[in-house]
Every structure is written in structure tokens, then in C-alpha cells.
Image (cartoon, grey):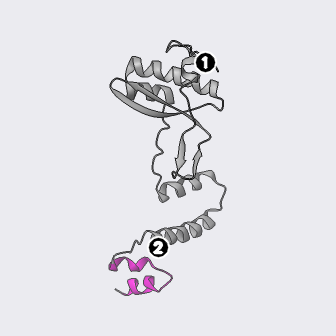
Amino acid sequence: MAKKKLTKFSINDVRYWDARVYHPRYGGAKSHKEAATFAVRIQAHGERRNVSLPGTTKRKAAESAMKLYKLVDMHGWERGLSEFRGEAPKPRNALTLGEYLTEVATTGEIIPRTLRTYATKVRRIAADLGKVRLPENMNKYDHVNGGAQAGSLH
């Protein structure tokens, strides 16, 4: 049987990358599985990395690998990867429970008296979950356990 002659393609050719994209394997030595996504191993700027690629076909993955290599070669690993992956979603601001309740109040969807009752209950639940305890002199606001009456006697 005659040996198949390997054709060398330029690194700027999609066919070059087509031979280098693969399905990563995971699991033990005896029972390994292949991931459904493609990956490529790229070496540039003295560093070698494995990078997951978008695309469900080998050709799309090869095109992505070529694009990634060009970006990394031009700009370096960090900037190249950030341009390749796109802008990361901005982190959400932490919304406090009080801010949330204020926003709910501005919608006007809930009757104010009902909202006050709900707010009291949800704050109690949040305090129990967060293990928040009121200082001793603050129990005058606890109308359920008689704190309001005890606070008014002082």
C-alpha cells in the first residue's frame, strides 16, 4: 500500500487548522469520553495553550482557530483571547433588599399596605437567612413579641 503524501498548507490556510482542531477527551484512562465541542492547541509568544472553540462543525472550528492564532500572534495572548471571545459581560451591581423594595414600590403594582406587610416579612426572612440579629435596645421595634409595648414603658 502506498503512503499517502501529506500536503503542507500555510498557517494562514483553513486546511492547516482543519488538521489541528480536535475533540478534547476527559475521564479516566479506561473509560474516556470526547467532548462535543472542538479545541485547538496553539503555541505563540513562548507559551502553549489549549483553547475551546465555537462552532459545531470541524470547518467552523478551524476557521475560528485560524482567527484566534492571527489575533494572538498580532496582539499577544491576553488581548488576542479577549478580542476572540468578545467583551465579557459587565458584572451586575449588587442590589440591596431595600433598593429592590423601593423599586417595587415605584411600579405601583402592589397596594402600599400590602407591600409594607410583604416587606416586613421578607426582611425577617432575609435576616434569619443572614443570621442578622438586632442589638438588645432595638427590640422595641419587634411588634410580634411585645417589644413595642416594652419599649414604650421605658
Residue 26 numbered tag: none
Residues 31 and 35: in front is 31
Secondary structure under tag 1 reads loop
Disc 1 and disc 2: Cα gap in Å?
A: 71 Å
Instruction: Tell me whether circle 1 and circle 2 mark residues in contact (CB < 8 Å).
Output: no
State which quadrant residue 111 falls in: bottom right
The answer to whether 102 is drawn above or below residue 77 in the figure is below
Tell me if residue 86 can be seen.
no
Task: Please provide the residue range marked out in magenta.
Answer: 136-153
Disc 1 vs disc 2: which is toward the camera?
1
Where residue 136 sits in the image (x, y, percent)?
Answer: 33, 80
Secondary structure under tag 2 reads helix
Tell me if residue 109 can be seen.
yes
Q: Name the amino acid type tagged 1.
A: Lys
Mark toward the start of the polypeptide (1 vs 2): 1
As drawn, is 143 to the left or to the right of 55? Answer: left
Residue 4 numbered tag: 1
Residues 45 and 79: in front is 45
The answer to whether 37 is drawn above or below residue 6 in the figure is below
State which quadrant residue 119 falls in: bottom right
Q: Is residue 49 magenta?
A: no
Residue 128 numbered tag: 2
As drawn, is 10 to the left or to the right of 3? Answer: left
The residue sitting at 47% across, 52% down in the picture is: 95
